[in-house]
Image (tube, grey):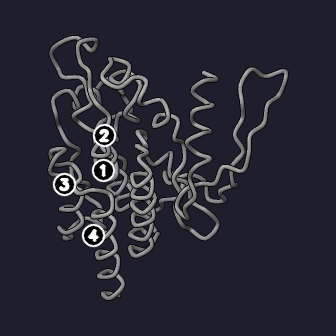
Amino acid sequence: MEVRVRREIVVWMGLSHDNIVRLLGTIKNPDYPFIGMVSDWMDNGNLADFIVEGLALPHRLQITCDVAAGLAYLHSKDVIHGDLTSGNVLIDATGRARLVDFGLSSIMAAFENTSFLTLTIGGALRFRALEISPPLHGSPEDFHPTLTTACDIYSLGSVTLQILSGQQPYYNIPQNDALVALALAQQRKPDRPKSQALIGRDEYWDFILQCWSKAQERPNAEEAHKSLIRLREEALRAQ
């Protein structure tokens, strides 16, 4: 575990971007076996806690732009996040989003093409890319997925869905990981939420579907960022 934490520290120390939470330092308690990491305090908690029904659409779209900008920066540094979920997007005092938790990205290379990826890496189930989810038939030990930047883009689509709708992916499946895992094994994508932000706004849903397309057909992070900027500007003009 300490090796993993040290690798995360090395990755995090090399990052500097407005949409990435800053690593301020580390701390080691002789009575505690692990290294602690000290980062900026984010006044508004994580994205899942911050997204409320009354949040204006342009602000929601700004948050999606922030997430995509942070992701584009990571990919430009050859860092795959690997765990992009609403819990790993933090909101600062100004309401802007910053990405955190690069632990999975820092150990990805050591376990690529092994069953460890199947069981551990790829983020929370509801945000996980279909291509790194074990198939319905066969043993997980025989499934050796590869974590790629395209996996992060799939997760970006899922995070965008939650930002715009206020509902997590597979919102119609109860809080049961086994049922979500079954949906992933069946290659079922999340359903379109019946929320005001998505009803009658096909361009937003189309963007999400692009992120959920086959890995080789997904936009890269920079392209996704540009698309979201355009959608945000259109929303501002419509006010």
- The amino acid pointed to by label 2 is Thr
As measured in the structure, the alpha-carbon distance from the residue carrying label 1 to the one carrying label 2 is 9 Å
The mark tally for this picture is 4
Residue 236, image x and y in percent?
Answer: 36, 84
Pick whichever of labels 3 and 4 is earlier in the sequence.
Answer: 3
Residue 153 shows which numbered tag? 1
Q: Which residue is mark 3?
A: 209
Residue 97, image x and y in percent?
Answer: 52, 61
Q: Which residue is mark 2?
A: 148
Residue 55 appears left or right of 210: right
The image quadrant of residue 235 is: bottom left
The image quadrant of residue 234 is: bottom left
The 10 Å Cα crowd at callout 2, few under 14, some 14 to 19, many 20 or more, is many
As measured in the structure, the alpha-carbon distance from the residue carrying label 2 to the one carrying label 4 is 21 Å
Pick whichever of labels 4 and 1 is earlier in the sequence.
Answer: 1
Q: Which residue is mark 4?
A: 227
Look at 70% across and 54% down and name the residue there. Answer: 41
Q: Using the image as rendered, state which of residue 111 and residue 29 is in the foreground.
A: 111
For the residues bearing labels 3 and 4, Cβ distance under 8 angstroms? no
The 10 Å Cα crowd at callout 1, few under 14, some 14 to 19, many 20 or more, is many
Look at 47% across and 34% down and name the residue there. Answer: 104
